[in-house]
Image (cartoon, coloured by chain):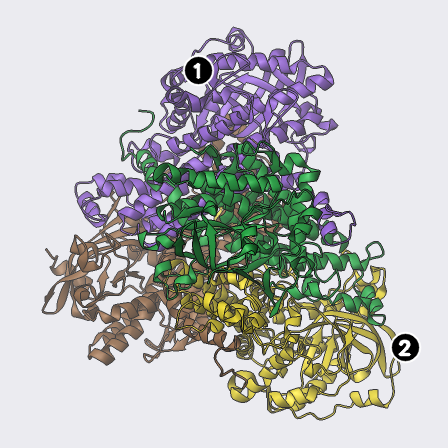
Chain colours: A green, B yellow, C brown, D purple
């Protein structure tokens, strides 16, 4: 049953928001009456929920950075003819893509978590060329629709999420082979003026914190799966959407009232399941419908952008390196050669990720649509390293931090008049370092290696933008083994057309 | 101020317990009125506390296993002339040491966590020879005291913890150089009939679940640190002891009432800070006092035993491999070559740890005291691999499990009449697998890789029995580089005494 | 065409050799008129060939060690009732297997190369039980034949090679599917009194240095491949055998006359292709013929022994560690923390291999034939680490040694009256270390990491006893994933028969 | 004793060469009467020596590529106002630096070895800014001298080597602390019109194949080492220079007459020791003399360029990947999942190196001298990965290739009328693949993993442009731990100036 009525119509009417600062943004999220479930309850106002709020703050930071450092976090858009938040900008040069990476690293440093806007940015960038190509081939009107929608988002400075990952059910089956056809999002009805969509999207980063989401197919599709080839924008507050927040490790510490045990009191990520219950989407918000052969193109272009966006994790890496270095110094081993060596290794791995990422952006090429697409092979290499190195950084950070990272008493015990002073005494590393500082730093390491932000720094690094095997499949595709075999045959004296003969 | 009086005297009087089963053991812990702090409150009865109880269950399992499989979990003691729990047995052969490892792996499989009795076992085994050697050199009476105490523990089937790790303060300073002399546990007064001890022990595994703890020095000590060279047994319920439980990742999920989100509802580990507030210990419970040059010997022998005891983690590895394999099967990728390959890699790493561990036990030698000491080099190698491989197993388990491991909604949402059915629908992998089973398995992976038992499987694997650098220092000591250089010089034709001339 | 006649008959008549020392052994190899090809020429006398001789020396060392240290390198055989060379002993206890490993490590230390007798030892040990089992099932007479042959070998102290690896042709096809049926060794004719064998065996370690070889099938065989299920002993000097020596990296340096550039002047390994041209083997030397279903059993038991025999490489590792440590000391960086750390890492990896190997031997079980079989899983784990860690040791050794390991001038230049003194001057590290010593040590590192003995230390570590994937397949078989899944289901609360309920 | 006279004067007079093609280049090397020693003999004409010639061919390829693909291998120089070989171009943009990398990868693909011209290119690029800065500070005339010399080199299209690495003696001592002051190259006399230089340079890549070499200091220097702060250009044919070629693994195979066993018949690298025997250098070829504080700057800028130049090894990686893939296909395992996975891993590691390298070039900044300097941190990260990944690629290539890579008979045996046909039969993988092709490909893998080009692909990857620890020291310098600690303190709530407050 699809929801209709005036309230719903209003949602599609592109209301004004005029968001500038982080505070503006936070206010724009209020009063939307989203159907959000968490811990068995309906969340009345996400902005005020102690578990959700840190994730709102992380997005808010993307607005404030644009105010503070416009060169870094905004870009001149030829679409709207104005300077727009970089997250809403379709890259018009390789440098635009590189600047995305630099902004991402900076926001990772500033928040120590996932700031959630990259999916939408990468979705716009991918759809820009895919809709263009589709229109060129099929005579469809998608590209202009997308430009119009993007222009609106730029003008109002909106947060747009990209919703790609379906629940997938049995992974050995295609969408139409599943025991339940809804396990992949699909069109269940085509009406005059629009389509009706059903399904769900899992692991949705920052969806509650967005104004719109764009649903996209998650994999290569065949003819028989053409109803799954749907791209469409939906307002987050649409009543046909239900959100169930995922539990993060240590999530409820945010509800305990303190600001120490959480590790990072201000910032966190967010993932939710979005259930799409027969939502009617007007045509002007539909950007692909049935052109199944473009699903693979879309996924490849989107993941090329998005796998390089994981450069953000190097910003988190900087924070973790800093935390480990600070603890080492305070605990009296900052000068130990093995500690220095571990910090160097952490930095080396972190920069290795960064190198492949920005190399991918620098090596961009212009597509017929006019926008720039980064190098896919290097993007996959970047992301593949992200599925490995943050885990090693986390391991090394725990090594340097010491066992206390996992056995520290609660901040309430530190505040207890009886045992607090004893804890203060026995966890002291010397008169120059307040024990509370050491405790806070240990909690930050816990937060990033086993706690709430480990979800973003580790598990999301593993699975976000595609699990490791997805990168390996793509690397196998992008590497030209046939050419490499030719090089080898020539040098082995088998092929007799050596380059210098 | 030391605590005295009839209540205290009773503690030293070796009361009968006659523990046989796990249930007996649980009952033996009741009513001790320990001073335990957790989350800012005094815990009234540890046995009944939802966060503590799973750790009690893990120890209880060591009793039940002894009943179920006496060959595996008990041993014939020449000391008491009876079959005793293997955790209370001083190894009388290499095979005894190997059987410890096999019992440890089994308990790791049964509980998926730290079962907490190894420290005490390893402490008894190390002290057995160290006290013997001390008496031989110094004419002290420690060995006979220890035998008497151990005989009592065997007869009553007690749990004895070994308390070694001091808070350490500034790690670039020795005990007596610290800004606060109490940062390492030490004797503050010697009286007729005993000594008074002050200090603290950090990261104390299973201390609340023990009947006695044996404090031991944590590092090599010089003449100036002789007051820190103290080994003594103290009843856990001694009023001079205060316990502050460490927070584990996701600890409070155990207080939420469900049995799914906790991941492993029945079993968990436990770590606490023990504060020792001027406890008077009668002479018969003192096993070293001032013989500072034996501190290094004790630490080396204890860590030789204990670093090989980390074979227990291969039991946890078996569980994690099983969880990943099960999820892969259910999710339809059990036959994918890359998944099979990752499972093989997990098994390979897990068995590599096991190999070095039992090799160390097999290669034991008999000491003058009559007991058997395992090979120190291989024990350090075993533990050093434990500081690496469980992290890689955890990474691979998360890889195979999928991103849901970190974004799954709470069990309360699954139970919610509105969204529950939707979650059940969208997280289904097919009609043959109840969604709840999949959810439970994902929560188990979360539990072991980021949640409560990640403390034991990862952080404790890193720091327990000494941090990685401690093993490297010991490996550097145990490897005979001078001999190796001689081998190389002979083969290079420099030294002219080749083996076959 | 099979070769016959009195000369050939003599070969099957079990002549006396009475070998005791290495010198006896070397003499026993003379005058055999083997058909050996190398560098396009027929080698007149292998013992005197400068490239072959170092490999003879390595085997000779196995005799001298038995004289020097009989506890280590001989064993009491219940078969012949005498003390025999351990390489000719079928293990009668787990300790026998462990002693094999200790002897192997020692010989690796003494020679820095492959001493070639393990294949035969492991073949006898595997065939002992396989022939026993075959006879029990099929009523064949193989076991007694084998015992008789082994008794002879023990009494005369012979070197027996095991020849398993066939050329294999197209690896996606079975023996009978190949375009040439001879690509796997097979029976081409069965006559009264014996069988005629044709085919080839590749990578044959030390075959020229053996008195007999035992051919064995190399893989699991089906009914259609029953002619390939042949095990038989053949005298090395049989005229139906042709040998083509493989080229090793830097092999011809041994023909240059010096003793420095070779790196290890006295010892080296040996591999050859053996071509078997219709050799008639009398029945008493046939130990399997057509019982195809036992081929897999034989391969599994043999590789279980042999994959653990790669513990020998830890002896080579000791040499390489020593060489790197010595160079570091001489070059003034012996005390640098990063160098010490690399040496520790080398030792750690080396001992990790050792641990799994001797654990496998210790964990042996007695078979119905009476002999002891080591643990297969740990043996595969041992070998699998051998396919990785020596490569890392080699990398680290090159790191510590410095670039000179690959750019050093020849010893002839050092001897040149003009440039020799200049080289001596410019490669000096100080007055206390003769430059020649440094050069010799660098050449030893080259020898083991890129030169002649890199074949044994690296490539053979990779492929000997089965390539890495063979171990992974076996590990996948030996690990009980079903049991592991059960452990996980119980702890996740899915299976309701927990161990303590 | 310095050499003088008309012959020597001629050398300094900048004769014309007008080199265009590789053939021109080869001719330009003839008849120089260099004092070259190899294997105890004086080499009469390096161009015709079978061991040297492949290294000449590799350099010749740099000329032919410039003819074939001028966009890739030449650049427009504002210095000489003409298009010049890219190896003689000082980068005038980030893109110039990126193009260097692309040319390097291509040449690595074309030659499978070190093509030797990068050191000179990187030396010119580093000296360009260092001389500029020196002149600005000290009023010296170095920059104009360098420009003049470079213009000459560009016009004549010369090969210029950079000679940095001194023998170093005892590595715990500075130049002036050595037992022999000549262990680092230094000025021994200052005369009117020039300086006299003595010392040696080790591991000199391609020096025989150059027209000039530029000597440079190898490390940070203090006031007491000011005579070691010398940069000067010397003609390669100067009679005061003596060259001793290093032995490479398998070097003499090039003297055996065949073209198979060498693995790569046409191309190889070259390293030699250069002994500088009191060479008088006229002032106009002196580019630094005594300004010791600039030695560190020079080393840092040069290594920043040069560590990123190791992107060349990704070209060799492409060849090795191709060789492994080709062998897998031919041997029937091209479709095996574990083989495909290993090829993907090889590609992933190879591209990871490439990513950091070109990222470093892209992230260049303009210096006051006007030229562009690449990012130092990423360059060090690139090279540090080069000290690891090629070793893993080599290991995987040997894994895929199979054991034959180290046990294959010689090409002479394949050509032998008796055994040749047998080898052909038994090493056949099927009718579609000539056995010789398989053999050639295996020899190429041997060549790159243990043979002659392993020197370049592995040992040079380890030590060239500085050993691993040198990169770690530089990474430690370039990473801003203090800033990272600040990030961590802010997020932990310690520093109260969070970015968004």
Residue C297 screen position, x and y as percent: 29, 70
Q: Which percent across, then down, holds residue D469? A: 60, 42
Pick whichever, D172 or D22, lies toward us.
D22
Q: Is residue C386 above or below residue D51?
A: below
**Residue extending furthest toward the top:** D6
Could you say which is closer to the camera, residue D281 or residue A283? A283
Q: Position of residue B191 (x, y in %)?
A: 89, 80
Q: Secondary structure at mark 1?
A: loop
Q: Nearer the viewer, mark 1 or mark 2?
A: 2
Crowd around label 2: few <14 · some 14–19 · many ≥20 (10 Å) = few
Count the labels in the image: 2
Do badges 1 and 2 share one subunit?
no
Residue B154 screen position, x and y as percent:
65, 88
Please tell me whether residue D95 is drawn above or below residue D238 in the rendered image: below
In this rendered view, identify the residue nearer to me: D104 or B266. B266
**On the image, numbered disc 2 is attached to which residue?**
B1
């Amino acid at each position: 049953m699809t929801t209709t009525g005036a309230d719903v119509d209003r949602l599609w009417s592109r209301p004004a928001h005029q968001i500038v600062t982080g505070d503006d943004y936070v206010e724009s999220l209020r009063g939307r009456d989203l159907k959000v479930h968490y811990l068995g309850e309906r969340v009345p106002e996400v902005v005020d929920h102690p578990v959700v709020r840190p994730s709102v703050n992380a997005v808010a930071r993307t607005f404030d950075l644009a105010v503070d450092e416009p060169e870094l976090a905004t870009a001149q858009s030829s679409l709207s003819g104005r300077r727009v938040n970089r997250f809403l900008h379709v890259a018009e040069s390789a440098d635009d893509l590189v600047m995305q990476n630099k902004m991402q690293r900076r926001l990772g440093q500033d928040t120590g978590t996932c700031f959630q806007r990259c999916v939408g940015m990468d979705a716009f960038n991918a759809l820009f060329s895919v809709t263009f190509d589709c229109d060129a081939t099929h005579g469809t009107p998608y590209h202009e629709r997308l430009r119009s929608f993007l222009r609106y988002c730029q003008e109002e400075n909106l947060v747009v999420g990209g919703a790609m990952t379906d629940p997938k059910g049995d992974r050995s089956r295609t969408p139409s082979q599943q025991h339940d056809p809804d396990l992949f999002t699909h069109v269940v009805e085509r009406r005059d003026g629009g389509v009706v969509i059903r399904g769900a999207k899992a692991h949705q980063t920052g969806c509650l914190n967005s104004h719109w989401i764009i649903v996209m197919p998650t994999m290569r599709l065949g003819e028989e799966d053409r109803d799954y080839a749907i791209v469409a924008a939906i307002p987050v507050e649409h009543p046909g959407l239900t959100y169930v927040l995922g539990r993060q490790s240590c999530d409820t510490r945010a509800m305990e009232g303190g600001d120490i045990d959480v590790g990072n009191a201000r910032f966190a990520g967010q993932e939710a399941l979005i259930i799409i219950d027969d939502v009617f989407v007007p045509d002007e918000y539909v950007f692909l419908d049935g052109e199944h052969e473009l699903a693979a193109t879309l996924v490849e272009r989107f993941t090329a952008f998005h796998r390089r966006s994981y450069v953000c994790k190097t910003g988190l890496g900087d924070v973790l390196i800093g935390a480990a270095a600070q603890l080492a110094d305070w605990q009296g081993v900052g000068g130990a050669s093995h500690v220095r060596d571990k910090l160097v290794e952490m930095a080396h791995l972190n920069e290795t990720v960064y190198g492949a990422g920005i190399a991918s952006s620098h090596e961009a090429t212009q597509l017929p649509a006019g926008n720039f697409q980064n190098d896919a092979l290097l993007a996959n290499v970047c992301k593949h390293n992200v599925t490995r190195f943050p885990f090693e950084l986390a391991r090394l950070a725990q090594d340097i931090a010491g066992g206390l990272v996992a056995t520290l008493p609660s901040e309430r015990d530190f505040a207890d008049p009886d045992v607090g002073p004893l804890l203060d005494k026995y966890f002291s590393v010397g008169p120059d370092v307040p024990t509370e500082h050491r405790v806070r730093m240990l909690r930050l390491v816990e937060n990033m290696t086993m706690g709430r932000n480990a979800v973003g720094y580790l598990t999301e690094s593993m699975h976000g933008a595609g699990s490791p095997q997805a990168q390996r499949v793509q690397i196998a595709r992008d590497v030209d083994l046939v050419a490499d075999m030719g090089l080898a045959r020539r040098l082995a004296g088998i092929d007799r057309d050596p380059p210098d003969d």
